[in-house]
Image: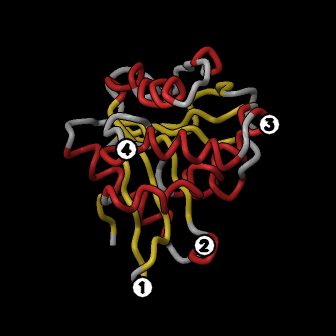
Amino acid sequence: MIRKVEKDEIPELYPYVYEIFSDMELPVLDEISNEFLEEIVVDAMHSPRYRYGYENAWVCERKGRIAGVFFGYSSKWENLVDGPLQVSMLKHGLAIDAIAQENECLPGEWYLDTLVTNPKFRRQGVAREMLNAASQIALKEGHQTLTLNCDIDNLPAYSLYRKMGYEQQTQIVLSGHIYWYMSKDL
């Protein structure tokens, strides 16, 4: 079952976000402690418009547990999605110049920012269910195109996206990693 995240579940989603940070090898992981980073990010996640905020978060629930999570939003919000993190960083005494805003999508799209499956639920259709739900959310919000970025080295994810109808458009670099920019017409 796919559902919106409840505000009180936000701390449970942090490990999924951290997994993405680790995969991207973000420099901040070497600059501050994991506990301090969690405090900052979870604080920002309480803002509805943060890229990982509760308004942009859905979970796939199986057997009463979170089997996966995805975050997405309309491209019209792209220039604002990191503002809550900057505010949280300032509140915690950190400089905001550490965040480099990179364009991840194009105008008029619904952008699937992050999709992570709980390792205990992998290869059970969770990612497929979340991708289908993201398509429905995008359509409901009036979008005809759904986009995402897939690390070029993540062959299982790339294969799934291709099977689900996503086509590679170009390569982009985000945080020093090369990604396939992929889209699907809805």
Task: Give the farthest residue toward the right.
Answer: 30
Q: Of the two numbered discs 4 and 3 on the same chain, state the one appearing first in sequence.
A: 3
Estimate how packed mark 3 is, as few (under 14), some (14 to 19) or many (20 or more) residues with alpha carbons within 10 Å: few
Q: Of the two numbered discs 2 and 4 on the same chain, state the one appearing first in sequence.
A: 4
Q: Amino acid at mark 1?
A: Lys
Q: Which residue is mark 3?
A: 30
Q: Nearer the viewer, mark 2 or mark 1?
A: 1
Mark 2 secondary-structure assignment: loop
Q: Are marks 4 and 1 in contact (CB under 8 Å)?
A: no
The residue nearer to you, when weighing 177 against 145, is 177
Mark 1 secondary-structure assignment: loop
Q: Which residue is mark 1?
A: 63
Estimate how packed mark 1 is, as few (under 14), some (14 to 19) or many (20 or more) residues with alpha carbons within 10 Å: few
* Rendering coords of residue 79 (x, y %): 41, 19
Estimate how packed mark 2 is, as few (under 14), some (14 to 19) or many (20 or more) residues with alpha carbons within 10 Å: few
Q: CA distance from mark 4 to mark 1?
A: 26 Å
Q: Of the two numbered discs 2 and 1 on the same chain, state the one appearing first in sequence.
A: 1
The quadrant in which residue 16 appears is bottom right
Q: Which residue is mark 4?
A: 46
Q: Is residue 147 above or below residue 158?
A: above
Count of numbered tags: 4
Q: Of the two numbered discs 3 and 2 on the same chain, state the one appearing first in sequence.
A: 3
Estimate how packed mark 4 is, as few (under 14), some (14 to 19) or many (20 or more) residues with alpha carbons within 10 Å: some
Q: Nearer the viewer, mark 4 or mark 1?
A: 4
* Rendering coords of residue 182 (x, y %): 53, 37
Q: CA distance from mark 3 to mark 2?
A: 29 Å
The residue nearer to you, when weighing 107 against 166, is 107
Give the residue drawn at x 55%, y 52%.
161
The residue nearer to you, when weighing 146 against 65, is 65
Q: Nearer the viewer, mark 3 or mark 1?
A: 3
Q: Which labelled disc corresponds to residue 129?
A: none
